[in-house]
Image (spheres, grey):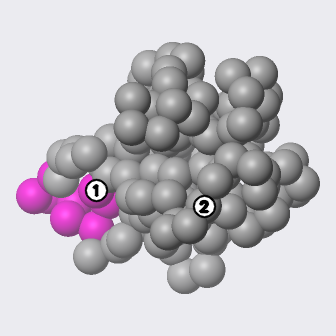
Amino acid sequence: MVDPNAVLRAHLLTVSGVTAVVGDRVWAVLLKPGYTPSVGPAVTFACRGGRTNPHVPDLPSATVQIQCWGSTPFVARSLYGAVYDALQGVERVQVGSNVIDSMVEDVAGQDLVDPGTEWPNVLSIWTLLVR
């Protein structure tokens, strides 16, 4: 089975509009231990579930939560814009031995502040079809 997190990270790290802002601070599930927004913006994402089709088992549909972190709400929102531009409407993109067949935003970015750290972030929800 395909690891949607690994494919999404690999793809984001090839998009200059994203890496120009975050470098390699693109992580699956959690922020890297020791990270603070003072070192620069970051992207985290995690699969929240999804669907599989028993007739096409090699084409899972993953629901992905993406968070863009920044030192200010403006920085987080600007990074969200770069991620949106990199992902919205992506179709048939080769990523290593995998293919992103489709990437569509389901819920637009929501401005948040993490209650534990008080770090600004923008949360969005996406559907990823990958094989």
Amino acid at the residue labelled 2: Tyr
Residue 54, quarter of the rendered image: bottom left
SS for dot 2? loop
24 lies left or right of 87: right
Residue 60 tag number: 1
Q: Position of residue 101 (x, y in %)?
A: 51, 52
| Few, some or many residues within 10 Å of mark 2 (<14, 14–19, 20+) | few
Q: Position of residue 116 (x, y in %)?
A: 39, 37
Q: Nearer the viewer, residue 111 or 99?
A: 111
Task: From the image, tell me which residue sits under label 2.
Answer: 35
Q: Quadrant of the N terminus?
A: bottom left
Q: Nearer the viewer, residue 51 or 13?
A: 13
Residue at 51% in and 31% down = 118
Residues at marks 1 and 2, CA–CA distance in whole angstroms: 32 Å
Amino acid at the residue labelled 1: Pro
Residue at 37% in and 71% down = 3
Residue at 22% in and 60% down = 56
User: What's the magenta region?
Assistant: 53-60
Find out whether residue 58 is within the magenta segment: yes
Q: Position of residue 59 (x, y in %)?
A: 32, 59
